[in-house]
Image (cartoon, rainbow, N blue to C red):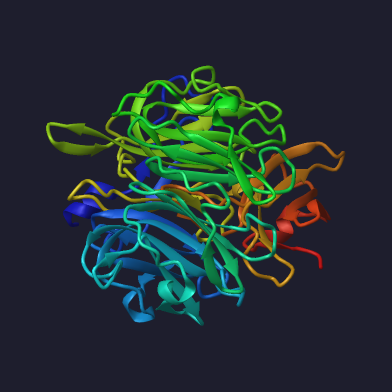
Amino acid sequence: MNTLLRRWGVLSIVLAAHASAASTPEQGPEFTPVQPDVFAKSGGLASAWADFDGDGDLDLAVSFGTGELRLYRNDKGVFTNVGPDVGLPTQGAEMRGLAWGDYDNDGDVDLYAATSGRGGTVGRLGDTIVGGLLFRNDNGRFAEVAKAAGVAAPGPNARQANWIDYDNDGDLDLFVTQRASSNRLMRNDGGTFVDVSGEAKINDPRRSVGACWFDFDQDGDLDVFVANQQGDKDGFYRNDGGIFTDIAAELNIQQPHRSLEEGGVNCAVGDYDNDGDFDLYVTVYGVNILYRNEGGKFRDVAQEVGITGEKMAVGVNWGDYDNDGLLDLVIAGYARENGKYRSVDHLLRNTGDRFVEMLVPGSAMHVGDHAALWADYDNDGDLDLSLTEGYNPAGHHPVLRNDLSAKPKRYSLQVQVLDRNGHLTRAGSEVRLYDAKGALLASRLVSPTEGYDSQSAMPVHFGLPSSAPVTVEVTYLTKAGRKQQRIEDVKPAKWAGRWLVAKEAP
C-alpha cells in the first residue's frame, strides 16, 4: 500500500469525551475516502457540485492554482476527470471561485470561474486580466464565452460568484465579489449581460471575498451579505426593487473594529435552530461569528452555542450529516507556523442547543483549508463531504463518503427546485418541511453559496426524525412577491435514492 493510501485508510472521527446523542456515539461518524489516487492533486481551491450531464447524480468541478479546471464525472459513484475531454482548461490563471447555473435557460448548467489574475494566458484577453471565465455547457461540452456574453470586463482577483435572479425576471444574473476592485453585478438580458453595479448601488470597493444571498426581510427579493477582508467592514445590502442599500451598521453586523489582519472570508446561510428563518455563519480571520436571525435582526451567538476561539477560517457549509433534523457545520481553515501551512478543520455537530466539536487534534480529517462541501454524491440518503487543500504542497482534494448506518440514511429527503421550464435558475428559493399536524420540521435554502467561493446546483437535503409523511413547501421569489407551492403527503421512503422535483407553477 502506498503512502497516500496508508495516510487515508478509513477515517473514524473521534468524538470529544463530552459529545452526546451522536448517530453512533461510541464510535462517532465515519467517513471513507473515495478513490484517493484520483483526488490526489494538490493546490485545489474552489469546488462545486452539479449534475452537468443530466444523468441523475452529482458531478464535481475543482479549480486549482495552476489554472487547471477539473470536472469529475460521477458514474454511479465512480469518478473520472473529464475536464480536458469536454473543453475545460488544464492550465492558466488561478481560479478562486466556481459557480454552476443555467444562465442561458437551455436546460443544462453552465460554469463560471472567477479568476485571480495569477498564472498564464487563460483569464486574459490580450494583455488585459479579466475577472472570470464563462463556460457554456453545450450538451456536455463546454465553450468559453465570457467576452461574447458580456462578463469579461477587466478586474483581477475575483472571488465569490453567485448566479441569482436579483430582479425576479426569471433568468440568472451574475454577482462577483472582487478582492482588489469594486464588486460587480451583471444583469442577464436574454443570455448577454449588462454591468449594472453602479446604478444598482452595489459596486462596493472594499476588499470583498464572500457573498451570501437570501431574502432576509421576506419582501420577495434577494438581499446580500458581503464578507470583507483586511480590516474592512462587512456589508449587508437590502434589495429594494433592484436598488441596494447597505444596512450592515443598522443591523449591527458590520464588525467596525477589525485590525488589518482581520476580516470576513466566506459565509453560509442556514436555519440551524429550525425556527423558520435563516441564520448566517461568517468565517473570519479572527473570531467566529454566528448571527442568529431574530425576526429580521441579527445577534452573534457563537460563544453562547459553544463556538469559540480565533481561527484562520476559510470555507464553511451547513449540512445535516447525521440526519437528525438539525444542521451541522463543517469549516475548513489553516494555521501558519514557521512559514508553513497546516490544515485546521472543524466538524461542529448541532445538538439542539449547542455545537460540539467532533474532530480532535491529529484527526485524519484535518485535510482541507479552502473548500468544504456537503453533497450526497451516491444518492444513499446521507451527506458526503468534499474538501480542498490549497496551501499544503502535499495536500489533495478528497471526497469522503459518509458511512452513516442504514436506519438514519432512510430518514431523509432531497428536493430539487426547478423553475417553470424545469431549469435550475431558482437559487435563493426556500424549502420547508411540515409534519402531518402542520408543525414546521426544518427550513433549507436553495443556496447560491457553499463551501469556499462556490455555488453548487443540487437538491436541498433534509434529515428527518422518522419516515412519516411530510408536506413540502417551496417559496419562490417572483415579480408578484413571495409565492408558496405545496406538495402534500410526501412519503420519504418512496424517494429513497431519488430526488423529489418541485417545479414552479406557470
Residue at the image point whose x is 52% and y is 52% from the top: 198
Q: Is 30 in front, or is 283?
A: 283
Direction from residue 278 to residue 302 in the image, left or right: left
Direction from residue 112 to residue 123 in the image, left or right: left
Q: Is 392 in front, or is 152?
A: 152
Which quarter of the rendered picture does the N terminus lie within?
bottom left
Spot occupied by residue 257 in the image (x, y as percentages of width and height): 40, 21
Quarter where residue 335 is shown: top left
Direction from residue 294 to residue 199 in the image, left or right: left
Name the residue at the left extreme. Answer: 338
Which quarter of the rendered picture does the C terminus lie within?
bottom right
Residue 342 in the image: above or below residue 398: above
Residue at the image point whose x is 71% and y is 56% from the top: 493
Spot occupied by residue 144 in the image (x, y as percentages of width and height): 40, 76
Name the residue at the front extreme. Answer: 199
- Examine the rendering and report whether any part of residue 71 can be seen: yes
Spot occupied by residue 250 in the image (x, y as percentages of width and height): 60, 26
**Number of marks:** 0
Q: Is 190 in front, or is 7?
A: 190
Spot occupied by residue 103 in the image (x, y as percentages of width and height): 56, 69
- Examine the rendering and report whether any part of residue 33 can be seen: no
Q: Is 333 in front, or is 81?
A: 333
Name the residue at the top extreme. Answer: 304
